[in-house]
Amino acid sequence: MEASDPSAHLASLPGAESMFYAPQIDRNLLLDFLMVFSRFEYSLKRGEFLEGNEKRAWPNWDKFGAANHERFDTTENVALKDAVDLLCRKPPKKQVIKDKQLEWEDVAHNPKEPQFLYVLRLVRTIRNNLFHGGKFRDGSIDDPARDHQLLQSALTVLRASVSFDSEISDVFGGANG
């Protein structure tokens, strides 16, 4: 069977061309981010970082962050240091409602919160912004290169985070997944 372009069927959806048109985002980077993010969440749920009830299960990112924040050391990993610096210096914004209007605000860092938990929250914000869209009401992009930088930085954080927990690493790599 011949492999096909996974996005080819999108063309048949009404409005799909404009809905998925984002020339400022490298599609391979986007796909890589979504795949790594999804596998990471799956690994959290397969490990000791599962929360939920009879109706729903979810990964507990905060528990993972709390359990591993001491392993989060950027001094030996230049790429991780650069990624964290960028995320903390120019964090993604989150959608909020103010005066019944959709607005954007910075993701605040609580000084008592370990940096690793904050960075993991920023990674999830990046994912949420991608999935929920609507980043700019008028369609303009102030800094197209920033999307690329945010995705690349989030990927770097996720890949480094996999190594902080052996069970997560095994599941992520396929040994137990």
Image (cartoon, grey):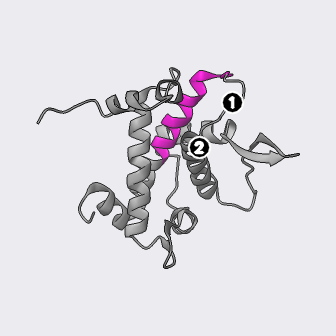
Q: Residue furthest left?
A: 1
| Residue furthest to the right | 99
- What separation in Å lies between label 1 and label 2 (alpha carbons)? 12 Å
Q: Position of residue 41 (x, y in %)?
A: 44, 58
Given the current orientation, which residue lies at the most extreme bottom position?
A: 54
The vertical placement of 120 against 83, above or below, is below
Q: Quadrant of the C terminus?
A: bottom left
Magenta segment, prevailing SS (helix, strand or loop): helix
Q: Is residue 97 magenta?
A: no
Q: Residue at x 65, y 23 (%)?
A: 141
Q: Quadrant of residue 142?
A: top right
What range is drawn magenta here? 140-157
Q: Could you say which is closer to the camera, residue 99 or residue 59?
A: 99
Indicate the quadrant containing the N terminus: top left, top right, bottom left or bottom right: top left
Question: Residue flagged by tag 2: what amino acid is it?
Answer: His
Instruction: From the viewer's perspective, tell me whether residue 170 is left or right of residue 67.
Output: left
Specify whether 88 is left or right of 62. Answer: right
Please tell me the numbered disc located at residue 136: 1
Identify residue type, mark 1: Phe
- How many residues crowd mark 2 within 10 Å: few (<14), some (14–19), many (20+)? few
Q: How far across and down, in percent of the image, does residue 107 sit? A: 72, 47
Asked if residue 151 lies in the magenta stretch, the reply is yes
In this figure, which residue is indicated by the disc labeled 2? 132
Q: Nearer the viewer, residue 142 or 136?
A: 136
Q: Where does residue 115 sit, x and y in percent of width and height? A: 63, 54
4 with respect to 38 (left or right): left
Left or right: where does residue 106 sit relative to residue 116? Answer: right
